[in-house]
Image: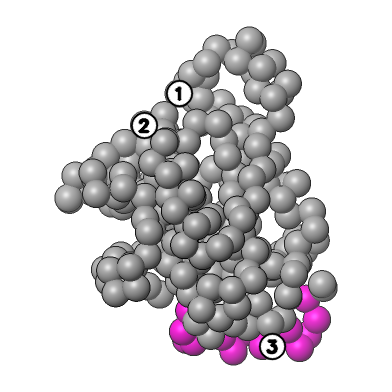
């Protein structure tokens, strides 16, 4: 579905609206051509719970990079059972990974920002391209508070030739997220209880100190300005 003037106007009016309002608008507007993109972190399970209460037939996908923690697969299983949903998996191209590992070694992503982004390209961006091929929009758990790279995000963002990106939680704080999870008994990744506020591939994620940024454990060997895998770059 193209971003018509009426859709753009409706989207602009969603700034300041609740996450529930934004998700309802997305599901009503895009129907079967919008899905929640979930890495099954705390923000994403909140989105899933909200969507389930608006339309139990919501659609959900994840990028299985091949290097996720067992706790991530465990919460996927919990979510599927609790909400009677079938998470759609998109995985990297095996031949491309095999080639990269043979040429560069198994841990080449530690060697430079360029090579880390190459790994993210193989494990995330290429599968995302296939996931997005049939979509008009996708729903994400981004929050402004998370990092300097996300400070200017809007509730709905449009990009030429790409599906609209829906960010219902832009104004939520980390405390808001955990208050919602507790109040609604939402399953969550148990790594969050062990010092992992942000969880991706286990080889690129570490625990953080109380004084550190919530994204400090992601690609911790890089500067904050480079800490995106490409999924959320404009």
Mark 2 or mark 1, earlier in chain: 1
Q: Quadrant of residue 96?
A: top right
CB atoms at circles 1 and 3 under 8 Å apart?
A: no
- Give SS at disc 2: loop
Is 225 left, or right, of 182 in this rendering?
right
Which disc number belongs to residue 110? 1
Q: Residue at 63% of width from left, 10% of height from top?
A: 102
Q: Percent x, y for residue 216?
A: 32, 44
Name which of mark 2 and mark 3 comes first in the sequence. Answer: 3
What residue is drawn where x is 56% and y is 63%?
A: 84
Front one among 19 and 219: 19
Give x and y (percent) for residue 131: 71, 50
Q: Residue furthest left?
A: 210
Which quadrant would the N terminus be assigned to in this image?
bottom right
Foreground: 124 or 215? Answer: 124
The span picked out in magenta is: 3-19
- The reply to whether dot 2 and dot 1 touch (C-beta < 8 Å) is yes
- Is disc 3 placed on a helix, strand or loop? helix
For marks 2 and 3, give the CA distance: 41 Å
Pointer 2 residue: 221
**Tags 2 and 3 in contact by the CB under 8 Å rule?**
no
């Amino acid at each position: 579905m193209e971003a018509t003037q009426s859709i753009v106007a409706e989207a602009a009016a969603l700034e300041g609206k609740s996450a529930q309002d934004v998700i309802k608008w997305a599901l009503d507007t895009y129907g079967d051509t919008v899905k929640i993109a979930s890495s099954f972190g705390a923000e994403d399970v909140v989105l899933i719970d909200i969507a389930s209460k608006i339309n139990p037939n919501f659609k959900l996908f994840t990028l299985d990079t091949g290097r996720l923690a067992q706790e991530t697969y465990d919460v996927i299983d919990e979510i599927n059972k609790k909400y009677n949903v079938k998470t759609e998996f998109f995985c990297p191209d095996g031949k491309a990974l095999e080639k990269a590992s043979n040429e560069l070694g198994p841990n080449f992503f530690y060697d430079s920002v360029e090579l880390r982004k190459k790994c993210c390209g193989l494990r995330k961006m290429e599968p995302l391209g296939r996931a997005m091929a049939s979509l008009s929009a996708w729903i994400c758990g981004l929050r402004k508070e998370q990092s300097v790279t996300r400070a200017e995000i809007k509730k709905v963002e449009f990009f030429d030739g790409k599906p609209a990106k829906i960010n219902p939680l832009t104004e939520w704080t980390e405390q808001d997220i955990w208050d919602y999870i507790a109040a609604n008994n939402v399953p969550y990744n148990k790594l969050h209880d062990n010092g992992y506020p942000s969880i991706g591939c286990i080889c690129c994620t570490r625990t953080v100190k109380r004084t550190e940024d919530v994204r400090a454990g992601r690609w911790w060997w890089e500067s904050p300005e480079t800490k995106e895998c490409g999924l959320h770059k404009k």
